[in-house]
Amino acid sequence: MSSIAAHRGGYRRVLAIGLPLVVSMGTATIMHFTDRVFLGNYSVDAIAASMPAGIASLAFLSFFIGTAGYTGVFIAQYTGAGRPERVGAALWQGVWFCFFAGLCTAGASLLAGPLFELAGHPPAVAAMEETYFRILMLGGVFGILDATLSGFFTGRGLTRVVMLVNLAGALINIPLDYALIYGAFGFPEMGIAGAALATVAGGAVSAVLFGVLIFTRGHERVFRVRSAFALDRDLFTRLMKYGLPGGVQFFLDIFAITFFVFLVGRIGRVDLAATNIVFSISTLAFLPMVGFSVAASTLVGQALGAGDPDAAHRDTMLTMRLTLGYMAAVAVVFVVLPGPFLALFQPRDLDPAGYASIAATGVTLLRFVAVYSVFDAVGMILFGALKGAGDSRYLMVSMGGAAILTMIVPTYVAVECFGAGVYTAWAFLTAYVVALAGLMWLRYRGGKWRAMRVIEGGKKA
């Protein structure tokens, strides 16, 4: 057994890498959650508009974030292979991609009007959707940079730095969110536009902090983070080869959810509001789970870079057990105590009686979340493991196929052709999550990932 594998395989290492990422994702959860709570209390139209517009912006950004995020996989495998001098070059290929991506996302802000006119939502909601989407797209480059620059630390297993940077971003975002939405602390009341500006500001702070921490003299000596800035054609091509399918996969996943939310909006205003609220609540469970998924990707990448697939498997299984334990506890809470979560979103312009129908629908939808979140835990961890190996093409094809066959097409037919309600739509969403978990398990069990590498000298994925 190699020296790096000798100290791997324990819960301590998994937790050392995973827990800071869980806290980081938890910070993002809190930011999104408080954003939705503030908007929910601000008005019904604001909370109804925030989720479709937020998911639509993420659908556009997701392709670029997913592609740029593969920088961390390269850094993990270079770290495991004992080649730190290649880390800076890998990082810079991601940064060059970010510059191009920022121009594309800013240009996409021009699509706000036609996009939400096509959605067919009520005029007051559509106007807010356009505003929210446009601002998030204009500032989207910061989220893409964050995905790239954070890979310098996550790929090397130094996840506490990522946690601290994200905490700093939250300290900016949350109070600014409140101030700009309601008009507090001397700021003007901006409603949903203020929420979008606060989100962009938090992302900008995080990106700047990452830059300050990365491009130091000490890191230059070890990783060449300054001198390896040139575009490396071979390395950039490999980043695009593995990263672009990763970007497409991320886009397909977000597009499927975006399409789902837009369809629910056509069912009715109450159903849309309840769906948006429940999605906001479910982020309490989902985003911390993403932290463990990133940890699995890092652990597998480092182990495969070191030529030790057995260590990668041990760490993957340990991470899955921890995540399943967490998700099972969350699922029980969603079933037993849905009321307190839903009560947080009661708008100030709606009395309890008016909110009762939204809350009643939300209780049932949280039960769907409780069911599919356990399957999601399995799918997300195995997804992280396969991503760490570089199996991006399979992830793209499987996610796209599952989304089309189990959710997009059947939900559209059920809602548009047969007039199905929100519970039928959520049943198809649950089927999508279950199918995706099964596809991840089949691929992982097949074992092809054990021989995959993204860095030079390894077997092509």
Image (tube, rainbow, N blue to C red):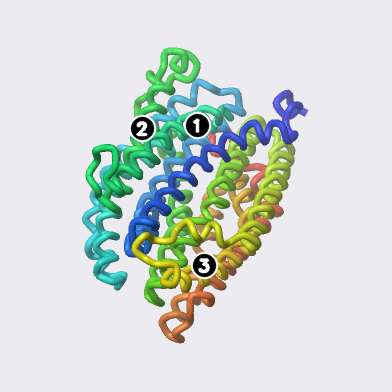
Q: Nearer the viewer, residue 284 or 118?
A: 284
Mark closer to the chain start, 1 or 3: 1
* Residue kind at label 1, given as amino acid type: Val
Name the image quarter holding residue 184: top left
The residue depicted at 48 percent of the width and 79 percent of the height is 421
The reply to whether discs 2 and 3 touch (Cβ–Cβ < 8 Å) is no
The residue depicted at 59 percent of the width and 69 percent of the height is 431
Left or right: 309 as drawn, with respect to 36: right
Give the labeled residue for mark 2: 205
Q: Secondary structure at mark 2?
A: helix
Mark closer to the chain start, 2 or 3: 2
Q: CA distance from mark 2 to mark 1?
A: 13 Å
The image position of residue 177, as x and y in percent, is 35, 44
**Up/down of 52 relative to 65, above or below:** below
Give the labeled residue for mark 3: 362
* Residue kind at label 3, given as amino acid type: Gly
Crowdedness near tag 1: few (<14), some (14–19) or many (≥20) residues, C-alpha within 10 Å: many
Left or right: 295 as drawn, with respect to 162: right
Q: CA distance from mark 1 to mark 3?
A: 34 Å
In this view, the mark in front (2 or 3): 3
